[in-house]
Image: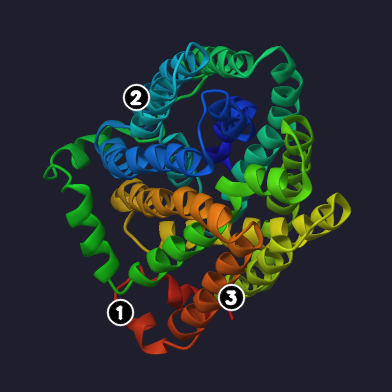
């Protein structure tokens, strides 16, 4: 397909982007501890980044609809570069907080990559295209944590500065190689539209729309449950199994390998064989069971076993949610809608790190897994009601994804 030629370029961009991010991600709790941060303060560190993303991601997405994906991608890489330099040079917890806020405010690069894919793929190949980027995401998480763990023996500032160097490489790569995905005609038409509404108002309006509201609700609660796992994984590994920074980084590299296999190989085949709504339901149930077992995993072998089905379920659900959202709106709203989806993910990310740190400090590591499982079980009932049984909603509007779900059944 001629339109797919930019995908290899975008693939390399996402790999480098996630490689830089995953170099430092599993080390942040240990880095913050060197400045005397408690589990609650470490949770607030994740909350600050998510809050900044909540404010910035929808605006970045909507402005990319008007001015093009490429300029906003360049802006996001530049913000991440500044943030990682600040992180590497940090001398206090306040400096660490500032670095994460700057990166979160303008670094909505993954949502922009998803919007880019929507521009260059048709609906039939959308899930496969998003799965390829998911595989790039996984490759970044295979290599990044392992390298970060190795570099951390010379201090936690070294992986942060290495992440900054990768951002610089990525910036050059995008400037040289990545073309704009929006045609001049589309940009001109989008520029004539009113300015994007503020995040809160746009978010409330989108949640009320029958064509995208159920999907955005699903995104919110999935992000909350999975965010409890993701943002607190290193702390749970430390307090429950006694793992340090390097073993935790290697386990996250294993998770990255699983993500590559799932999103690069499995999602496209599953999507071609089963209706998306049923896969989203199955993913919700699978994540609930896996999080419950994870909460009580007291050994590395059991942890490695439970991470396999968790990666399969989460990778499938996440990719199909993004694909369904791009089909639920007109083409000129894709960037803004994915930005709102990223904002909901950030909204969940505001609560998840702090809530997880509080639960760990008050009840113990097991409570994080139990709460995440309970949220996903509730979400499974929501998906059953609104994506599988609500057939009347499928007839509302030409862009409703549920009609596509039903036709593919």
Nearest to N terminus: mark 2 or mark 1: 2
Q: Secondary structure at mark 3?
A: helix
Question: Label 1: which residue?
Answer: 396
Question: Label 3: which residue?
Answer: 281
Crowd tier of the residue under label 3, counting other residues whose Cα lies within 10 Å: few below 14, some 14–19, many 20 or above: many
- The Cα atoms of the two marked residues, 3 and 1, are separated by 22 Å
Vertical side of 386 occupied by 88: above or below: above
User: On the picture, is 70 further left or further right than 313?
Assistant: left
Q: Position of residue 403 (x, y in %)?
A: 44, 77
Question: Label 2: which residue?
Answer: 71
Crowd tier of the residue under label 1, counting other residues whose Cα lies within 10 Å: few below 14, some 14–19, many 20 or above: some
- The Cα atoms of the two marked residues, 2 and 1, are separated by 35 Å
- The Cα atoms of the two marked residues, 3 and 2, are separated by 37 Å
Counting labels gives 3
Vertical side of 70 occupied by 125: above or below: below
Quadrant (top left, top right, bottom left, bottom right) of the C terminus: bottom right
For discs 3 and 1, the disc positioned in front in the rendered view: 3
Residue shown at 74% from the left, 17% from the top: 153
């Amino acid at each position: 397909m001629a339109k797919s030629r930019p995908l290899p370029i975008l693939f390399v961009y996402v790999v480098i982007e996630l490689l830089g991010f995953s170099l430092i991600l599993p080390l942040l709790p240990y880095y913050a501890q060197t400045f005397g941060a408690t589990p609650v303060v470490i949770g607030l560190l994740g909350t600050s980044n998510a809050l900044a993303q909540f404010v910035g991601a929808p605006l970045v997405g909507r402005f990319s609809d008007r001015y093009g994906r490429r300029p906003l991608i360049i802006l996001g890489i530049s913000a991440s570069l500044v943030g990682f330099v600040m992180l590497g040079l940090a001398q206090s917890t306040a400096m660490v907080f500032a670095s994460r806020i700057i990166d979160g405010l303008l670094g909505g690069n993954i949502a922009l990559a998803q919007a880019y894919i929507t521009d260059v793929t048709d609906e039939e190949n959308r899930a496969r295209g998003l799965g390829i980027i998911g595989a790039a995401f996984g490759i970044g998480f295979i290599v990044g944590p392992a390298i970060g763990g190795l570099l951390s023996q010379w201090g936690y500032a070294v992986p942060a500065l290495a992440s900054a160097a990768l951002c610089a490489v990525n910036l050059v790569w995008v400037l040289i190689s990545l073309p704009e995905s929006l045609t001049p005609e589309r940009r001109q038409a989008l520029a004539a539209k009113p300015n994007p509404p503020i995040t809160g108002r746009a978010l409330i309006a989108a949640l009320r729309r029958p064509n995208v509201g159920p999907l955005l609700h699903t995104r919110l609660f999935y992000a909350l449950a999975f965010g409890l796992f993701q943002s607190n994984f290193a702390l749970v590994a430390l307090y429950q199994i006694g793992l340090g920074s390097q073993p935790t980084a290697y386990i996250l590299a294993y998770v990255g390998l699983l993500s590559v296999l799932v999103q690069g190989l499995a999602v496209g085949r599953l999507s071609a064989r089963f209706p998306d709504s049923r896969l989203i339901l199955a993913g919700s149930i699978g994540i609930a069971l896996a999080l419950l077992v994870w909460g009580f995993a007291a050994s590395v072998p059991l942890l490695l076993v439970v991470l396999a089905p968790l990666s399969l379920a989460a990778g499938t659900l996440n990719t199909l949610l993004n694909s369904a959202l791009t089909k639920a709106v007109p083409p000129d709203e894709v960037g803004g809608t994915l930005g709102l989806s990223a904002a909901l993910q950030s909204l969940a990310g505001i609560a998840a790190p702090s809530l997880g740190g509080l639960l760990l400090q008050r009840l113990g590591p097991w409570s994080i897994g139990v709460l995440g499982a309970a949220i996903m079980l509730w979400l499974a009932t929501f998906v059953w009601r609104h994506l599988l049984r609500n057939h009347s909603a499928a007839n509302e509007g030409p862009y409703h994804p549920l009609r596509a779900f039903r036709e593919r059944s």
